[in-house]
Image (cartoon, coloured by chain):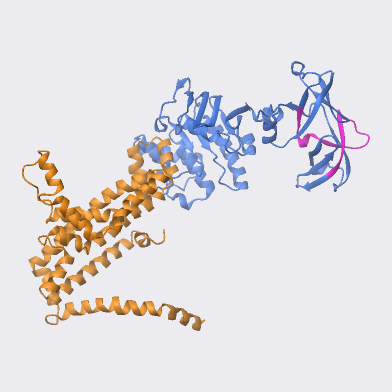
Amino acid sequence: MRRQDAGWWLLILPAFLLMTAFYVAPIAQVLAISFTEPSPGLGNYERLFTSESVQRVILTTLRICVITTSLALLLGYILAYKIALASEVTRRWWILTVLVPLWISVLVRAFAWVTLLRRQGLVNNALMEAGVISEPLQLVWNEFGIIVGMVHYMVPYAVLPLLASMREIDPRLLAAARGLGASRLTIFGRVFLPLSMPGLIAAGVLVFIFSLGFYITPAILGGGKTLMVAEWIGLQILDLIRWGLGTMMATVLVVAILATLAIFSRVVDLRRVFGSGA
Amino acid sequence: MSGTGHALALQGLTKRYGSFTAVADVSLRVERGEFLTLLGPSGSGKTTILMCIAGFVAPTAGAILLDGKDITPLPPERRDFGMVFQGYALFPHMTVAENVAFPLRVRKLSAADREAKVRAALDLVQLQGFAERLPRQLSGGQQQRVALARALVFDPALLLLDEPLSALDKKLRAELQEELKALHRRVGRTFVNVTHDQEEALSLSDRVAILNHGKLIQEGAPAHLYEQPRTRFVADFLGKSNFLQGEVRESVPGGFVIGAGATRIVQAVAENHRPAHGSRVLLSLRPEKITLMSEQDEADNIVEGRIAAWSYLGAGFGLNVETSDFGLLRVALPTWRTPIAPRDGLAVRLGWSAAASVPVMEDAA
């Protein structure tokens, strides 16, 4: 028995070593640097409470993430609802349409949005020609641009867990509610929405956590004016060579993600969020 | 929760899906307070008819009338019919009480009224004390009762049941059949039930409508359908039946004689239903109406044969008797009145009276 157990452990040993060497060790080092550079102590973490720029980055990130998550959930819910109630063939086409953006590089998509949203971009030109506006709107290199790009990226991630959850709902329940006299709105509010709630929470957690560490999209669509946490960390470490401050923020990010997961693991089956089980 | 139910009428109800006809020109009346069962094999259109009555399926042609008023265009949520779905369709995220209160909440009843009615409905199905449970914490039979309470709590004009007992095991099914019947008597409402289980149909219903290939084949009280099947299909689907085919040879007082090979069979018949001389007729003979005869016994009809197979069923014996002119005849005998010990190859005399069998029509192709 013992011997067999040892055998199993040997089997996963390579993976374990790989994870330790390339994943756990660097994170441990990040943690270590945050407490030692430039001088040992809690100096870097003190900045969380004293530095206005640090607080501003965190608040901006949280604001953008909350807005992104809400919008992605709203759009994702509408899409998933449509898809869940569609016929088998239509459903396959819809899912393909939702998944296609996932296969396009995030970089390409970010630049595509820049082309669309910049001052002489398609959107501004169209609005000007239609006479809706006289001056080009500032649609990019600010929070608005970041949110547009991020929502676009996140919607598929919201759709998938939502769809999984909605397809588990027995259509006979909706028919039963109708037969018992409920209007469409009541059926949605009292039956469909509560039953799709696990999917909604799962999608929310997934999108929110994903958004927290977003780098490329905010970097390109924010144009360096609106900083989110990931870009700020890059700036500290690569440009300002302030390793201590950068790693401190990275640690905060990791802790925030773990905390979010810990809270929601009590409410929802996390395996559903990451696509296994269910 | 008392009072009379409402009367329902189907007039020329037809439903086509492309070139496939699911329901073909079915006309049917369900009287006030009646328990009607739509009985048929799968694909007979019985569920489609129920869905048309419920409003989930729009008929291609024909009308549905409730107390003489055309309700065909009404959507299901405005028909005010209670429905027990196949598999019950209880809301899994609501407690028993919330499930039962759902139709009341939708109708915007006050909390106090809701509570009183929910309690009365749960009393009706004997589920007091289960109000705070979730459906998944209940057994199949209990879930079925919740579904009934939910369908009856708002005093619906009609209760529709879609194979309400099919998900249960045999013993429980028999128990709930009794309960359903008692419930129907207590609430006095009009029930329309759909099933493929002929025993359930016979034991529950005031009237049964037998369907096949979307057509209404015959309707009537259970005993009438069983004793006087009009077609081979009805005789075969409702219980078991032997079929004797022969040619009309002569007329006798109160009946006629058919011949098949060397055998003569006397069949009783009403005077105005005499078949033409020489025509081919089909008789349905129930296995339990055949008795075992000794050498001296007399009967209107006597056929000899040999036991080809037999089985002991506790309450009775089932024999398959090979005969020269009618092939295999199925015979059901009560155990305690079977004078012989059946064994394969044993020669037996079978007898039945002229009124035991009934002429039926071949099914239209």
Q: Is residue A218 left or right of residue B125?
A: left
Q: Is residue B303 left or right of residue A265?
A: right
| Picture colour for chain B | blue
Instruction: Say whether residue A13 is visible.
Output: yes
Q: Quadrant of residue A64?
A: bottom left
Q: Quadrant of residue B106?
A: top left
Q: Nearer the viewer, residue A32 or B261?
A: B261
Q: Position of residue B96 (x, y in %)?
A: 44, 46
**Residue that extends furthest to the top in the rendered view of this protein:** B272
Using the image, determine if residue A15 lies above or below residue B268: below
Using the image, determine if residue A20 lies above or below residue B51: below
State yes or no: residue B359 in magenta.
no
Q: Nearer the viewer, residue B317 or B212?
A: B212
Q: Is residue A99 left or right of residue A133?
A: right
Q: Nearer the viewer, residue B360 or A156?
A: A156
Q: Position of residue A62 (x, y in %)?
A: 18, 60
User: What number of labels is visible?
Assistant: 0
Q: Quadrant of residue A129?
A: top left
Q: Which residues are magenta?
A: B282-307
Q: Position of residue B352 (x, y in %)?
A: 83, 31
Q: Position of residue A168 (x, y in %)?
A: 42, 50
Instruction: Say whether residue B97 is visible.
Output: no
Q: Residue at x 14, y 43 (%)?
A: A126
| Picture colour for chain A | orange
Q: Is residue A1 left or right of residue A39?
A: right
Q: Residue at x 55, y 26 (%)?
A: B26
Specify the quadrant that holds the C terminus of chain A: bottom left
